[in-house]
Image: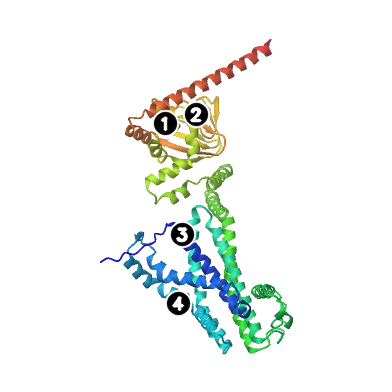
Amino acid sequence: MKENTTILLPNSPYTKAWKYMLCVSWIHVLFIVPFKTGFAPEYSNTPYEMFDFATDLILFLNTVYIQPRLARYYEGELITDYVELKKRYVAADFYLDVFCSLPLDTFVEVWAKMQHTRENAVLLELFCMVARMPKLLHFVRLVQAMNRTAVRLSSYLNPTYIHIFSQVLLIFMLTHWIGCAWSLMCIVQGYGSDDFVMGVEWAQEPLLIRYAYALFWGIGKMSGADTGTGSPQTHTQRVFVVFISLASITSYASIIGSLSSSILSMANQRDNIAQERIEKLHNYLRRKKVPIQLTKRVCEYMEYKIYHDQNEEESKILNDLPDSMKSEIILHTNKNLVAQVPFLRRASDKLLHELIIKLKQRVFAPNEYIFTCGEVGDKMFFVNKGQVEITTGGGNFIISLGAGSYIGEMALLGDGKRTASVRTVTFCDVLELSKEDLDNIVQKHAEVDFMKDIKRSSFNRLNAMKSAMEKENKDELSEGEGSTA
């Protein structure tokens, strides 16, 4: 008979709630275990011990019950078979989790309280300290959880921010561990026994005050600042300082280096890439003895393209997605364009998806002709950013258009020849649609009279342009007659 076992799916709200609780338990253990070791007499017999028992229970249940029943993705396939999940978990993480999660120190503490005796109290406390140490290996699981969280939140938040937060958390955690270790040294050596440990007066201070001083000592040791204590006096203290110094130097340098690298890369990554590409281009043009003015225009174009043209980066990001998802994303990112172009507003969602996915982004520099009057046209353009001027074949100004406009559709509707020229005024980002792609889309959606909508929009715009030109000519003529009179 097949075993009926409940399987927890990765995206289940119960699974997510459990993972949050698990992360809180890991952080609790990684902070409380050193704290109990460094301030054991004050921490024992307090209500806070109930949190320790709850954390131990959560971690133990996670190992023996939750993890073998948690569905996982292996090589892109979701595994939900309990036997297979248990087999894979035992082979991968089970033994480490058991070693970390066994609450041996809790068992000893409970047993000692049930005996109602303080005989061998020092030996029992020493055993508890040793039994707590494996729990610190939960640090591995916490780092793995942070990395997974960074991946999941990358669509909402820059992963660098999460990396910086984790590095700051690790710095505080390491400082906490060192401070608690020094507090344990003070207890073992005795308060006021020499200049290296806390003075006798600190023994009477509240627990929070002594912890704050221990934390200050840990920060001082990590940063090399003055800790307010003397140099080590005994061999034990010297060994302790050597161990702490090596641990803090390597860890602190690694964390600070990683933190600095994250901040700098976040701030300068695009600038560095842009500068490197522009320098390579400039050196190439100089070797080829390209005129200075042309070199300046080319470098300005390249700089604009790097900082404003996202097409190459978007292509890499969207390349692995299916066409349906890709078209939905592209449609969403171009929703402002769709809202501004009349014949696109009236098109069906299916037609829009097919049309927008065919658009190709291009960048034009200032004073560059997108097309000229009289040439054969096989493309139309949508102005996504920038400003263009439409002129006659003789160079006379007709109208200026900005973002949300479309140009070049008349050649696709008529005999194919351009009836006007279009020149850029500023840097322009335009979306290009070829006649071949447009014809294929129109043919595929024959039931929708899409070309009729384009013709109607173009006719209305052409009439508006003619009316504006006639009005402008009348105004100029009136001004001329007035000046003559």
Residue found at the very far top of the displayed protein: 485
Residue found at the very far left of the displayed protein: 1
Q: Judge whether 315 appears above or below 180 on screen.
A: above
User: Residue 425 lies in what quarter of the image?
Assistant: top right
Q: CA distance from mark 4 to mark 2?
A: 76 Å
Numbered circle sitting on residue 421: 2
For discs 3 and 1, the disc positioned in front in the rendered view: 3
Q: CA distance from mark 3 to mark 1?
A: 56 Å
Q: Could you say where residue 27 lies in the image, as x and y percent from the top left? A: 54, 68
The residue depicted at 46 percent of the width and 38 percent of the height is: 431
For discs 3 and 2, the disc positioned in front in the rendered view: 3
Lower sequence index among marks 4 and 2: 4
Lower sequence index among marks 3 and 2: 3
Numbered circle sitting on residue 16: 3
Lower sequence index among marks 1 and 4: 4
**Residue 247 in view:** no
